[in-house]
Amino acid sequence: MRYLNPKADLTFKKVFGEHPDLIISFLNALLPFEKPEEEITWVEYLNPELVPFNPLRKDSVVDVRCKDRLGRQFIVEMQMMWTSAYKQRVLFNASKAYVSQLPFTR
């Protein structure tokens, strides 16, 4: 019997992007929460496309993006191979997610 590889991009997005219980379990197992009240109990999926406020800037798409009851945003990416640009892409996407939470007046 053959199974889909959960590390493949489309399978990863399907599994973790459409099943809140799995992404909650994954994040709680992965992140070093110090207190039980910090653990994730609920998520809301967010648009995985990070669109900049300025239309002349670069937009990007992540595998899974969600937030919890405390308003913390999580970007979950599957990376099978290391590339020299990966570190910059992680920093770029995290910065965009951070800036999107700031209380701007448009």
Image: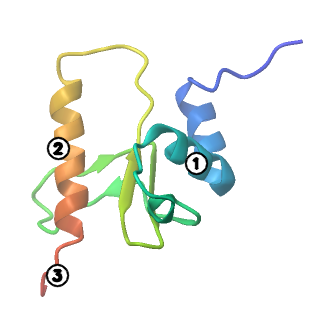
Secondary structure at numbered mark 3: loop
Q: Earlier in the sequence, mark 1 or mark 3?
A: 1
- 80 lies above or below 66: above
Residue wearing tag 2: 92
Measure the C-alpha gap from mark 3 to mark 2: 19 Å
- 85 lies above or below 52: above
**In the rendered view of the protein, which quadrant contains the C terminus?**
bottom left
Q: Tell me if 94 is positioned left or right of 22 in this view.
A: left
Q: Tell me if 4 is positioned left or right of 48 in this view.
A: right
Q: Earlier in the sequence, mark 2 or mark 1?
A: 1
Measure the C-alpha gap from mark 1 to mark 3: 27 Å
Instruction: Report the disc number at residue 23.
Output: 1
Which marked residue is nearer to the observer: mark 2 or mark 1?
A: 1
Instruction: Report the disc number at residue 103.
Output: 3
**In the rendered view of the protein, which quadrant contains the N terminus?**
top right
Location of residue 101 (image quadrant): bottom left
Secondary structure at numbered mark 2: helix
Question: Looking at numbered disc 3 in the image, what kind of residue is underneath it?
Answer: Pro
Q: Tell me if 103 is positioned left or right of 38 in this view.
A: left
Measure the C-alpha gap from mark 2 to mark 1: 22 Å
Q: Is residue 52 visible?
A: no
